[in-house]
């Protein structure tokens, strides 16, 4: 009976030693993978900073810079994942074979990203827009902050960050407002019976006294439409692209205040009801 107990105890000790050894081995594998992950992330950050400094010193175009940095980061992350898989004891050749066997499914899943990658190359090649250009595309408008490997990042006027796939940008209409000057247009109504020449003279005087309004092309003031309750006046003027919104909103208030001061009335919708006689 004593021999049986000693034998059982020896088996338990042997099993415990094996479990401890396997646990230590597994722990070392996890530690190694974690160390590779941490070191890899640090290396990726260092490479990113180094690439940015080198490109800034060489004055590389900001659009190309953001695209290349994005692509290099993706490649380094893929290499890091493969290194971690190898550290975990998974044969990378088997992993590659598994990816190859699932190539059709992966290709279908990545077809959109491949088109976005190709779209990014087209954008860099033909340059319909660059970083810091103000564009309108896919129902969104904003300043281009980055052209990444798969997406273009826009910063909207209200400080939202919008990611638009490069594939759609390279194959759809894009309005680029990165020009020296832009035309601004206002349409407002005045009462019927108001002298148009008086309105025109007031607007032209306002424009001539504001240095933000360009003399060439010359401003235009005309009658836009004879509406139900008002004579609609169209006013067009040119300004520097950087002054566009300031001039637009500023002149809304200037025209309103000046017209009120000079007795030019703004109409409002009215309905005249005639009572039939009994």
Image: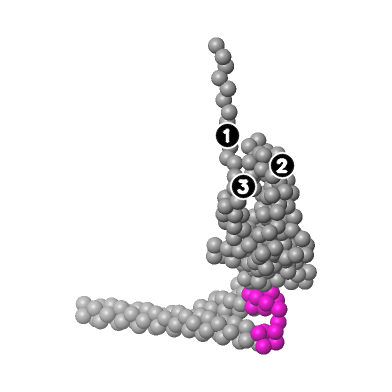
**Separation of marks 3 and 2 at Cα, in angstroms:** 18 Å
- Rounded to the nearest angstrom, the CA distance separating label 1 from label 3 is 18 Å
* Residue 151 part of the magenta segment: no
Quarter of the image where one finds residue 60: bottom right
Task: Give the quadrant of residue 189.
Answer: top right
The residue that appears at 36% across and 81% down in the rendered structure is 20
Q: Name the residue rendered at 58%, 76% in the picture.
A: 77
Answer whether labels 1 and 3 touch (C-beta < 8 Å).
Answer: no
Q: Residue furthest left?
A: 2
Q: Residues within 10 Å of mark 1 (few under 14, many from 20)?
A: few
Number of the label disc, if any, that sits on residue 225: 2
The answer to whether 271 is drawn above or below residue 91 in the figure is above
Mark in front: 3 vs 2: 3
Instruction: Describe the element under mark 1 as helix, strand or loop.
Output: loop
- Which of the two labelled residues, at mark 1 and mark 3, occupies the earlier sequence position? 3
Instruction: Tell me the crowding category of disc 3: few under 14, some 14 to 19, or many 20 or more residues within 10 angstroms, Cα based.
Output: some
Q: Is residue 109 visible?
A: no
Q: Are marks 2 and 1 in contact (CB under 8 Å)?
A: no
Q: Write the start and end of the magenta stretch as one range.
A: 55-71
Residue at which label 1 appears: 270
Q: Main secondary structure of the magenta part?
A: helix
Q: Which residue is mark 3?
A: 264
Q: Secondary structure at mark 2?
A: strand
Which callout, 2 or 1, points at the residue further toward the start of the chain? 2
Q: With 1 as the anchor, is 236 left or right in this view?
A: right
- Give the CA separation, mark 2 to mark 1: 17 Å
Which residue is located at x 58 percent, y 28 percent? 272
Q: Position of residue 277 (x, y in %)?
A: 56, 14
């Amino acid at each position: 009976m004593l021999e049986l107990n000693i034998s059982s105890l020896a088996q338990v000790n042997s099993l415990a030693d094996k479990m401890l050894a396997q646990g230590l081995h597994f722990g070392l594998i996890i530690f190694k993978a974690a160390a590779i992950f941490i070191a890899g992330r640090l290396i990726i950050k260092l490479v990113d900073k180094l690439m940015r400094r080198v490109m800034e010193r060489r004055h590389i175009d900001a659009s190309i810079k953001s695209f290349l940095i994005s692509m290099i980061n993706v490649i380094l992350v893929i290499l890091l994942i493969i290194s971690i898989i190898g550290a975990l004891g998974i044969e990378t050749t088997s992993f590659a074979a598994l990816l190859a066997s699932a190539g059709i499914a992966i290709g279908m899943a990545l077809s959109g990203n491949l088109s976005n990658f190709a779209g990014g190359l087209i954008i860099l090649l033909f340059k319909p827009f660059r970083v810091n250009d103000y564009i309108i595309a896919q129902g969104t408008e904003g300043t281009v902050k980055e052209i990444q490997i798969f997406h273009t990042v826009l910063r909207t006027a209200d400080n939202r960050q919008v990611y638009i796939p490069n594939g759609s940008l390279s194959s759809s209409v894009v309005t680029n407002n990165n020009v020296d000057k832009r035309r601004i247009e206002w349409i407002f109504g005045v009462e019927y019976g108001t002298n148009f020449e008086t309105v025109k003279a007031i607007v032209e005087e306002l424009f001539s006294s504001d240095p933000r309004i360009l003399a060439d092309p010359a401003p235009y003031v005309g009658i836009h439409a004879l509406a139900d309750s008002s004579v609609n006046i169209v006013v067009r003027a040119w300004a520097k692209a950087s002054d566009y919104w300031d001039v637009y909103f500023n002149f809304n208030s200037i025209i309103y205040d000046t017209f009120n001061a000079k007795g030019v009335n703004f109409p409002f919708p009215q309905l005249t009801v005639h009572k039939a006689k009994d």
